[in-house]
Image (spheres, grey):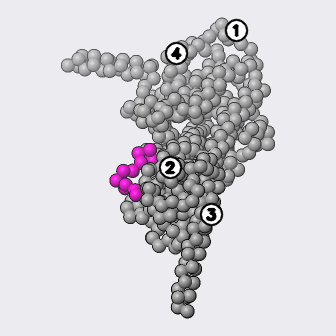
Amino acid sequence: MKMFVVFTVCVSVVVLASAQADQKLKNCNEVRTAYSSKGFNVNDVPNKGVHGDHLKVCPQGFSCCTLEMEEKLSQQSRTDLKAPVHQLSSNLQNTFTQRHRHFDQFFRELLNNAEKSLNDMFVRTYGLMYVKNAELFEKFFRDLRLYYSHGSGAVNLDDMLADFWTELLERMFRLVNVQYEFGDSYMECVSRHMEQLKPFGDVPRKLRLQLTRSFIAVRTFTRGLALMPEVVGKVSTVSASPSCVRAAMKMLYCPYCTGQVALKPCMNYCLNVMRGCLANQADLDTEWNNFLDAMLGLAERLEGPFNFESVMDPIDVKISDAIMNMQENSMQVSQKVFQGCGQPKLNMASRARRSPKDSGFPGRFRPYSPDARPTTAAGTSLDRLLTDVKKKLKHAKKFWSTLPDTVCVGDRIANGDDCWNGTAKSRYESVVMGNGLANQVSNPDVEVDITKPDMVIRRQIAVLKEMTSWLKAAYTGTDISFVNEDDGSGEESGSGCDSPPCDDMYFPTTEPVKPVIFKTKGGNQPSSGTRLAPCSLAMAVLLLALLALLTRHTR
């Protein structure tokens, strides 16, 4: 009886071993199918399991893999590792490439529409007088476009606006005083005292503040939108290290070698592998988030006090108001100029040709009506564009640090304990590492040299930090020159406001009135440092000479 029992047990062991061998052989057949589905030659797979002593990455017990298969699957794991990261990065790139295109198109078309609106209305209002001086306004808009495209290295906004008003004053002064002759030196005297004359009222000051702040904000914000796809593109080109590829191979394809082609990695195992492989990318997160916060801050400025649309839409009305202010006060302005710069000579030839109806300007603009403004081809308003992009910016925060968590989801992992832990189908016991290079010193699945950060990513960290400083400067209305686009002089332009004062777009508080420096009939002595008019200077010299002669005579 005992012999029978022993015999039965032996037979059972043999049968079980045979069944297991058959199962392993069957698994190799499944491996053949899965392996060939990756595009590899099915003949690479052995017909039955072999000893895995030759393998360099996967467990060296029973295996359906040869060394050649392991090498090919290692290359495949590099592709498979990159695919989800590339897809997520591409989605982010495409999102902000599209937003940048929309914003850029909107701003350029808003400029074009503003110029067209001004030209049409000035032709109707001022007629031939405007047509003869249209190049001044064409240059005005050309310079605005040039600044938007190339920054303060190409156009200094403060200087450009000052030159525009000075040139407009000189032209208008000649028109309202056509009966006189004015040489270049006389017109220089007129321009020199423009700040004290204020021929255009407060329009130049208000428009300078509104234009500089809105243009600086618009240009910097658009540049920030353009930078995001550039940074993502460069970071996504960083190749996986050999140790990362080895870890990915072990996680993704070593189950093939054990005949378990459907077995997925444990979630925490996947996180440790991905956090090790994406350690350098995670270090981008701090500056990335700082950059996004600065973009969101500037977006709020564009919605409020630096609103580009509210500045450009009625710019024709504002400039017309300045012109009409000069016309209405032309007599007072002219009298002050004549007192300060001298009485000009009469132009008899021009006076004979001029008819009374040629003097002055024929009319004033009608009130500004937003409904009359043309819409942009971008098909929306600035507020709607900003609402959309703010949602995208918020969604992009922590993109790099959450990348491993975004990859290790769905059908890429197995939930629960029936998962691949790197050596077998069992629970993963190791502790999950934190994000970033410094936290990978004890990563159990990926060898990471924390002393050698990736230089491509370090460069992008520096780029983001620099762009963040530009965005913060633009938030206060200051333009920090773009070194890579400008001449590298580091020159700044703009209004340079602190945060609270910038909230008031129309600046209702009045500036202290500066005393007029022109000499009046009272003969008051000008203050020190004030430039004297030529006739006053000659009189002062003559008085000094007489005083010297009287002194000698007394002695």
Marks 3 and 2, how far apart in space? 21 Å
**Which of disc 2 and disc 3 is earlier in sequence?**
3
Residue placed under numbered mark 4 in the picture: 184
Q: What stretch is highlighted in magenta?
A: 447-458
Are the residues at dot 2 and dot 1 in contact (C-beta closer than 8 Å)?
A: no
Predominant SS of the magenta segment: loop
User: What's the distance in space between the residues labelled 3 and 4, CA to CA?
Assistant: 100 Å
* Residue 428 visible in this rendered orientation of the protein: yes
Judging by the rendered image, the residue that carries numbered circle 2 is: 68
Mark 1 burial class by Cα count in 10 Å: few <14, some 14-19, many 20+ = few
Quarter of the image for residue 177 reads: top right
**What is the secondary structure assignment of the residue under circle 3?**
helix
Q: Split into 4 quadrants, where in the image is the C terminus?
A: top left
Which of pointers 1 and 4 lies earlier in the amino acid sequence?
Answer: 4
- Which of the two discs, 3 and 4, labels the residue nearer the N terminus? 3
Of circles 3 and 2, the one toward us is: 3
Find disc 3 in the rendering and name its residue.
Answer: 26
Residue type, label 2: Glu
- Queried whether the magenta region covers residue 208, the answer comes back as no
With respect to residue 15, does 52 lie above or below?
Answer: above
**Residue pictured at 48% horizontal, 52% vertical:** 67
Q: Which of marks 4 and 2 is in front?
A: 2
Quadrant the N terminus occupies: bottom right
Find residue 352 and name its label.
Answer: 1
State yes or no: residue 452 in magenta.
yes
108 vs 427, left or right, is right
Q: Vertical placement of 398 versus 172: above or below?
A: below
- Mark 2 and mark 1: Cα distance apart in space: 102 Å
Q: Which of marks 4 and 2 is nearer the N terminus?
A: 2
Q: Which amino acid does label 3 sit on?
A: Lys
